[in-house]
Amino acid sequence: MTYTYNNKGTCSVRTVVELNDDGGFTAFVPTLPGCLAEGETPEDAVSNVKAAIEACLSPEDDPFWTGDAGEVREVVL
């Protein structure tokens, strides 16, 4: 697993940062397929991927979740 939890209730996610062909950078999360973001610097890409991670983990943003088949519950790991 690439998630690390701490005693402050936050989670760290391992992210890969690669140089793009155009000179920018892409950050992606291998355990969350399709979860990626770009930036001009590695730091920008990592900062931008935080929003992508939140969106990937949000059931409200899941196009396959209609809301009428159940309820959203938060699971603390």
Image (spheres, grey):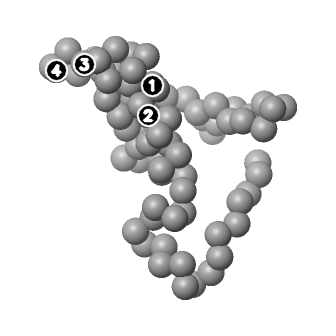
Residue 16, can we see it?
A: no
Which residue is tagged 1? 46
Q: Say whether disc 2 or disc 3 marks the residue closer to the N-terminus.
A: 3
Q: Are marks 1 and 2 in contact (CB under 8 Å)?
A: yes
The residues bearing labels 1 and 2 have C-alpha atoms spaced at a distance of 5 Å
Image point (47%, 46%), residue name: 32
Which residue lies most toward the left here? Answer: 22
Circle 4: residue type: Asp
Circle 2: residue type: Val
| Picture quadrant where residue 36 is located | top left
The disc at residue 73 is: none
Q: Is residue 2 above or below residue 68?
A: above
Dot 1: element? helix
Residue 33, can we see it?
A: yes
Of marks 3 and 4, the one in the foreground: 3
Which residue is tagged 4? 21
Dot 3: element? loop
| Picture quadrant where residue 21 is located | top left
Locate the N terminus and report the quarter of the image it occupies. top right
The disc at residue 49 is: 2
